[in-house]
Amino acid sequence: MEDLSALQDQVDALSAQVTKQGSVVRQLKKDGVASEDIAEAVTLLKKLKVDAEALKAKQDVLDPSKKFNRKTFDELILRKMFVVPSFEIHGGVKGLFDLGPPACALKAAMIDQWRKHFVLTESMLEMECTCLTPAVVLQTSGHVERFTDLMVKDPETGECFRADKLLEDAIDVLIESSPDMPKEEREDHLRIQRQADAYSPEEIDDLLVNKYNCKAPSGQPYSNAFPFNLMFKTSIGPEGTAVGYLRPETAQGLFVNFRRLLDANAGKMPFAAAQIGLGFRNEIAPRAGLLRVREFCMGEIEHFVNPDDKSHPSFPSVADKELILFGSDDQLGSGKTKTLTIGAAVKSGLVNNETLGYFMARTQLFMEKIGMDPARMRFRQHLKTEMAHYACDCWDLEIQSSYGWVECVGHADRACYDLAVHSKKTKTPMLATQRLDAPKDVEVAKLKFDRKSLGKAFRQDQRVVSGALEALAESWATFEPIATALETDGKTTVDGFEVTKDMLTWTKTTKKVSEIKFTPSVIEPSFGMGRILYSLLEHSFYQREGDEQRIVMKFKPAVAPNKCAVLPISSSPEVNAVVDEIGAELMESDLSTRVDKSTAALGRRYARSDELGVPFAVTVDFDTLKDDSVTVRERDSMVQIRLAKSEVTRLVFDIVHGRTTWEDAAKTHRIVQVSEDGETTDAEGATTVVEGTTRGKFSRPAEKI
């Protein structure tokens, strides 16, 4: 068999070539170079992608560990009602899913861990902002402009389609069906295809109808193209004149509340605010289950920090944590990841600053805490061609699933962009203050305004203009470009207002300051809870060795939907009374419990619990009625221990809350191995079997004494 290590090297190298060539194509389009050069680069990119897919397919065949039984997994998720299509009996809607009882409990436990791990531990300020957002907020943030695509409709059915994708598909079909097409004509079609997302509505209408004769599924011509925004648009109030949107992210609610949050934190910097809630995106082509949906849960943290000091006081506590990092240079070079401590990554400059690195490490620890496989997680750095112009550094936590590497948590140093744009739009200062250890001299500009000229030019806005100039004058470094422009051109623009030289005079001077004012930078970890939930389901799924019909969800006790199952060995009233007593005691300790009194075989009831990921199962038998002892079975090892009934709740509680482990419990209690047909062997070698009669089931020694 071909060496898998060598094959992995080939896959990594080819993936790096694909990434590098993709970056080249994006840059060429951005620079507006000749279409022939772009076409050549795109052709090479397509060839590299085909080669990479072929090599990965070969790797999957040779490496059994990369196989995932998607069919069995999907059947389990649906059968056990983890996730089901929304409005299923009415035909369902793409991109909408309902969480059933087990997934609902799993998500609640996961979010509870997230809140404890981040919000409570870091003393963050948590908010719950409205999902309905006025248009002006999202216009200011740039979402209205960025989330628009051109759409067309089938005039008969009303079904909507993305216009640029229809154009691209039509060109693909035309080229594939015309192998003898002249090269010049083919290149002309490909040029149009490359610019499909850049055409105006009128241009794309002409291409779809006149050049490519595209028809809707009904056979009718498509409607005229119109802008389609991926945000859900609505109106606020009965008049219908105030436009609003369902928020595409939760962050904007925190940004616009920055001043109140700063006051709530007694003006102290740095600090963090957090929010868990729903986001909405009207995806055109939802796919891949919970990975791309129209309504989703997000957990976002906005850590506000001095842009000149992005250190973090708790960074030393995580500095030695090792992460799998896929830097931009490695993506374009070797195609291989590196395992580094976050301390080394920050020190070398690979990760921009301590605060960003701190949250990356804390995210890794959270994922491990809830049960994600560390070997299938990596942090990928954004390439320069995909990073926002205002961002300093961005790293995505990607989790490997059967769909490949999926971005689940974004970590972005967003600089001062968000607070700055909201401040500029609303004329509201978004400033923080930092007191200096000792006063220092700084160069400033001393201004004197001609109030008559200001009032005549700006009227009610004169205070806004003078305030903006005074804010710039706090530092000569920020005011000097204004002064230069006024001296040279006689005018300049400040926050959208044209200021002329006759409106003010200035002198450069120094003053002693004991505090500085600044617009904070924002470090933002953004968690896609739905994607994390799906990845956790995949990482927890396995089939028992030697019996693929036995499916297990190996949830960690802390996040398992049910912490314990309680099973009677008999249906007798005496046994059931003890079962109810144990179940009630577990529930009183906030340990969600599943009581299964069905008449199915004990092994079958164990299997049911395993499929739901229940970590422990308490079995009440006839010995319980004699000595108040029960057996507790651990899901993954299937090992049972015998202990007093009164110890059960404390043991399960301590394991769930990380105060002890199953391994420790097994060392201090008598172990009883139980086969699935009911035969048990205790530590002394005595063997018992479970037998059934018309009165129920009971255990007895396997050999007569």
Image: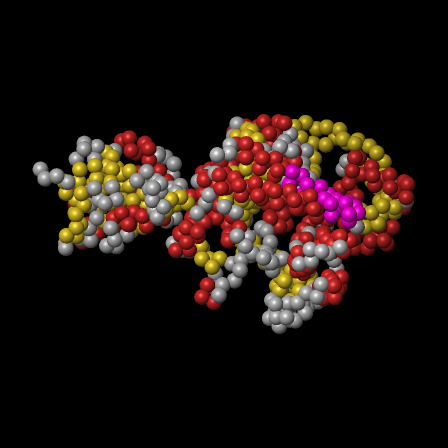
- Principal SS element in the magenta part? helix
Residue 32 appearing in the image: no
Specify whether 236 is left or right of 701.
right
| The quarter of the displayed image where residue 12 is located | top right
Front-most of residues 12 and 676: 12
Measuring 66% from the left and 56% from the top, which residue is drawn there? 176
Front-most of residues 168 and 350: 168
Residue 285 pos. (x, y %)? 58, 57
| The quarter of the displayed image where residue 152 is located | bottom right
Measuring 54% from the left and 37% from the top, which residue is drawn there? 378
Residue 174 appearing in the image: yes
Measuring 74% from the left and 66% from the top, which residue is drawn there? 210
The residue stretch that appears in magenta: 17-41
Residue 58 pos. (x, y %)? 53, 41
Q: Residue furthest front?
A: 180
Q: Is residue 30 magenta?
A: yes
Specify whether 447 is left or right of 282.
right
